[in-house]
Amino acid sequence: MVSILGFGCMRLPLLPGGDQTMIDEKKAIGLIRHAIDNGVNYIDTAFPYHSTTRMWPGGQSELLVAKALSDGYREKVKLATKLPTWLIKTREDMDKYLNAQLERLATQSIDFYLVHALSGNSWENLQEIGITDFLDKAIKDGRIKYAGFSFHDKYESFEGIVDAYNWSFCQIQYNYMDENFQAGKKGLQYAASNGLGITIMEPLKGGKLAVGIPKSVQDVFDRADTKRTPAEWALRWVWNHKEVAVLLSGMNAMEQVVENLKIADEGRENSCTKEDLAVIKKAKSVYEQGIKVPCTGCGYCLPCPAGVDIPACLTCYNNHYIFGREERYAFVPKEARASNCVQCGQCEIHCPQSIGIMEALKNTKDLFEK
C-alpha cells in the first residue's frame, strides 16, 4: 500500500530569514509533488509542525500539505497526521482536534492517524479519558482509516502500548546510531511480530548522518570498496531491515529528494552485505567518540519560557566535540543562549529523546560562555 520512502513534512524549506512558521510554499509544494510524481505515496505531517508554540491553532505544515495535495494529488497518496496528545484533556478534545485537522488538511478522511509522541504516562492518561473509544468511532465513521501511534519513551513502555489496542501501525525512531534507543531494534521486532506496519522516523538523526560529516567518519566511508554518500549508507541500513514498511525523510531541497528517490530504488531488505554492515559499524564507533547529547533538533522542547534556543545551543555543543571546534555559537543571539536557562524543566517534559536538557545547557554555557 505504501512506498518505502515517505515524505516527512516537519522540516520544509523556509523563506530567507523566516521563523518556523514561514514556509517557502512554492518550493515546498514543488518538492512534495516531485516526490509524488516519482513514486512516493506516503505524506506525513502533524498538528504542531512548523509552529513556534505547539499549541492551538497549530502549525503551518498541515495547511501547506493541503495546498500541495490539491489539483488531484490527494488521490495519489496516503496521508498521515497526528493527534496532539499534550493538548488533549477530555474525550471531547479528541474529536475537536481531529475535526480541525480534517478541515486544515482539506480532506474528508485521514488514511493513517497517529496518537502523537506516546510515552507510558501519556498513554495511561489517554486511556482514562477514552482514547480507544475515540479511535474505534473515528474508524467506524470514516474520519480515519488506520490507527497508529508514534513513540518517544523507553522500550519498557512500548510493549504495553502495542498490546493495549488493535493498532494497524506504529512509528519509531531508528537509525544506525539509535539501534538501542527508545523502542529500538527490540521494539521494531516486537511490533512486527504483532502484525503492525512500521514507519521509521529520524533515519538520518535529524540530518546529522547526512550533512556536516566529521572527517574521521567520512574517512571510513571513503575507504570502503563501495562508494556511497553518507545519506545513502544511513538509509540503506534502515531499509535493510525486513520489518520496515516506510522510511520518513524530511526533505527540504530538491537534491535531497532526487538522491533519496535514487536510493529508494535500490533500498531493499537484506540488501546490505557483511562488508557494508562492517563499514557502518565502524562509522558508528567513530561518531560515538564525539557526540555528547543525543539531540535531533526536532524542536519539541520549544518554546522555552526563558527564550533559549535549545536545539541551536545543543547542536553547537555537540559540534564542538564532533569537529573539534564550533564557531556558530557566536551567531546565537545573546537572549537565546544557554546562560538564559532558568532550570524550570519545561523542555525536559516535552523532549522525545528524554535528554537531561538543563544539565546539557549548563555544560553548553560553561563551554562557550566562560
Image (tube, rainbow, N blue to C red):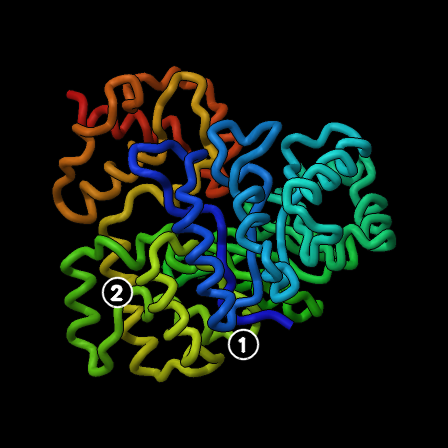
Which quadrant of the rendered structure holds the C terminus?
top left
Residue position marked by numbered label 1 in the rendering:
242
The part of the image, by quadrant, that contains residue 310 is: top left
Against 95, is 221 above or below?
below
Left or right of 242? Residue 222 is left
> Label 2 belongs to which residue?
283
Q: Which corner quadrant holds the N terminus?
A: bottom right
Residue 129: mark in rendering = none
Tell me the residue at 55%/71% (across/down).
3
Find residue 269 and report its horizontal and vertical position in percent.
Answer: 49, 79
Q: Position of residue 171 (x, y in %)?
A: 58, 56
Q: Specify whether residue 238 is in view.
A: yes
Q: Dividing the picture into quarters, in which one does residue 98 lie?
A: top right
Nearest to the observer: residue 241 or residue 105: 105
Q: Could you tell me residue 272's position as x and y percent?
A: 38, 80
Q: Residue at x 20, y 83 (%)?
A: 225
Identity, as a three-letter code, of the amino acid under mark 1? Lys
**Residue 324 percent across, percent down from the top left:** 13, 45
Q: Nearer the viewer, residue 108 or 122?
A: 108
Mark 1 or 2 closer to N-term? 1
Q: Is residue 339 left or right of residue 123?
A: left
For residue 154, say whether it is visible. no
